[in-house]
Image (cartoon, grey):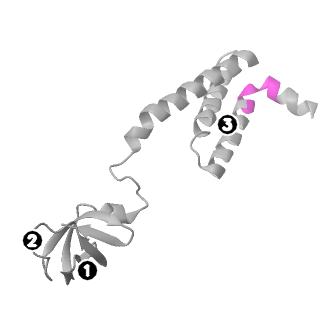
Amino acid sequence: MTGLIDFYVNHPFWLWLSAAAVFLAIEVGTGTGWLLWPAASAAAVGVVALLLPTNLPVEIALFAVLTIASTYFARRFLRPALAGPDPDLNDPTLRLLGRPAEVVAAFENGRGRVFVDGKEWAAQTEGEAEGETAPETGTRVSVVGVHGAVLTVR
């Protein structure tokens, strides 16, 4: 055991590389996104320890500063840049908003069926204005809302 400690003391690059690997393994297991930046910071400190003569307190301070800075900048600037226009990429129903649809079953009492994005859906009209007629079969409408498995169309 003392041989392993002596190895890490004499070769701090491997200590920091091991720490980076542990952080990265935990990150892969949890998928939170929080441990990616400490892993990158530990790897960076390892490279600094390899290239420059430093001691452990300086390396720990550098690790702390890099972790705080990289986590802050990633959360502040990277997340908004990666966020797409869709609120949830894994929810395909939300991608139907604004898409054109074709009425396949005439609307009665505000309810009917439409064909959109290769599928047939139950639908309801947005709200019938006075004098407005219900859409008939073959009419093009637009999806303006999704409520469970029922689309709201205009």
Measure how far apart labels 2 and 1 are at the Cα level.
18 Å
Quick one: 66 or 6, which is closer to the camera?
A: 66
Quick one: 36 or 146, which is closer to the camera?
A: 146
**Type of amino acid under label 1:** Arg
Q: Which residues are magenta?
A: 8-15
- Can the viewer see residue 55? no
| Mark closest to the chain's N terminus, 3 or 2 | 3
- The residue tagged 1 is 113
Estimate the x, y position of residue 67 in percent, counting from the top left: 60, 28
Assess whether mark 3 and mark 1 are in contact (beta carbons under 8 angstroms).
Answer: no
Estimate the x, y position of residue 38 in percent, counting from the top left: 62, 33
Q: Residue at x 63, y 45 (%)?
A: 27
Q: Secondary structure at mark 3?
A: helix
- Can the viewer see residue 134? yes
Quick one: 19 or 143, which is closer to the camera?
A: 143
Q: Secondary structure at mark 1?
A: strand
Which of label 3 and label 2 is nearer to you?
2
User: What is the crowding at mark 3: few (fewer than 14 residues within 10 Å), some, or many (at least 20)?
Assistant: many
- The residue tagged 2 is 132
Indicate left or right for 67 with 120 as reference. right
Q: Residue at x 80, y 29 (%)?
A: 8
Residue 48 in magenta stretch: no
